[in-house]
Image (cartoon, rainbow, N blue to C red):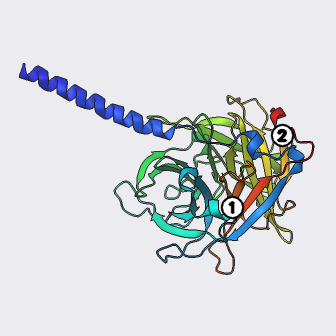
Amino acid sequence: MTMVVAVAVAVAVVMMFQSTLASRDMMVSALPALPSSAQALPCPLSAGWELIENVELFHKALDGDPVGGFSAVAYQRDQDRLWLLSDATSGYLVSVEGLGRLIKAEQSSLQAGRRLLLLDQRGSPLPMNFDGEGLVLVGDQAWIVSEGRRSHERRARLQRFNLSDGRLERNVPMLQAWQEAEGQGLASNKGPEALTQMPNGDLLMAAEAPLIQDRAHRGRDWVRFARLRPGSDPRPEPLGGVEIGPEGAAARKKLGLTELLAVGNDSLVLALMRSFAFPLGWSAHLRILQLPQVDSASAPPIQPLHSWDLLADGLPAANWEGMTWGPAMSDGRIPLLLVSDDGFNPLKSSWLSVLAPRRGPDCEPDRFSF
């Protein structure tokens, strides 16, 4: 009888442990709070964007440590807190306070918070080969995607960290087609840079530039998407791709897809395209895309529903790499936040820009349909 009881207790403990793990993984797939198309997009789309604020970011965190190289941004609405991801080789996040009050014109600057150093699963600092580029926050977890250099020591990664202590919780391997091998995979320092969470809880990421094995499509460069359905054993799945520019532009103009941001529709996403060419300098274009429901090897790359030249709308020329939705404005619009990367150049600045969707006289937001 004692052995039977012991076995029953052991089974109960195992089931409780499995339930705890399942509950933790369910946290990852919690639905994100995303604005609707009517709140977040220009109306009509051709109305474009209005520059509300352009704030120079700090060079030191609250503890006095130097910070920079901001490559991604995420916003916690319930805490009015921004988190900036640095692509420093040491790997860290920096919290920022006061965005809501800034947008309401109750203050003129943001307050740098603590620097959260990212750690491995043992609690030790990460190897000095980190290159974080995309950030998604889900509860007390931070999903981060980082670029690679086509080597075992510096390969692209999708990882989940604990936002409380910075410790690594999970590593997710890249798609086989994205991994470095002879004649295939991500090009060195060319992605993935973009990461967002869709309304259904899936994570969506994109390569910055074409994979080595991908030829141009109808004279156009294109990049691939991958979808991750969070769970107990997540594996990325291919999900088509999108054209980014003329053939060879990814190399010639350093043209790349640097960020994705989901809208409150299961298939809509904003894609940020950045390029640099001498002597013209930086460019920044924002496109709205409708994603396919399933991947099809025979389907052509996605065509944008609309495209905006953000520099023409007032955005300063800089290396724009991160996007997130901000707190609601007094008129109900949801602002788009963008962050730039100063490349750790002491003569340059990192910027946080706040853009709001314009409303034209012929706007009919209830008639948005894609």
Q: Tell me the residue at 68%/47% (across/down).
A: 261
- Which residue appears at 64% of the width and 53% of the height? 193
**Residue 147 makes an appearance in the image:** no
**Label located before the other in sequence (1 or 2):** 1
Q: Give the camera-side residue of 153 and 348.
A: 348
Q: Secondary structure at mark 1?
A: loop
Which residue is the site of mark 2?
A: 305
Crowding at mark 1 (Cα within 10 Å: few <14, some 14-19, many 20+): few
Look at 57% across and 40% down and name the residue there: 176
In front here: 327 or 169?
A: 327
* Residue sitting at the far bottom: 347
Amino acid, disc 2: Leu
Q: Give the residue pinned by disc 1.
A: 104
The percent coordinates of residue 359 (x first, y second) are 85, 48
Eyeballing the image, is 234 above or below 287?
above
Q: Nearer the viewer, residue 84 or 216?
A: 84
Residue 336 x %, y % = 72, 54
Amino acid type shown at disc 1: Lys
Q: Residue furthest left?
A: 2
Asked if one can make out residue 87 in the rendered structure from this viewpoint, the answer is yes
Q: Is residue 287 left or right of residue 30?
A: right
Q: Are marks 1 and 2 in contact (CB under 8 Å)?
A: no
**Looking at the image, which residue is at 80% across and 45% down?**
216
Where residue 200 sits in the image (x, y, percent)? Answer: 60, 33
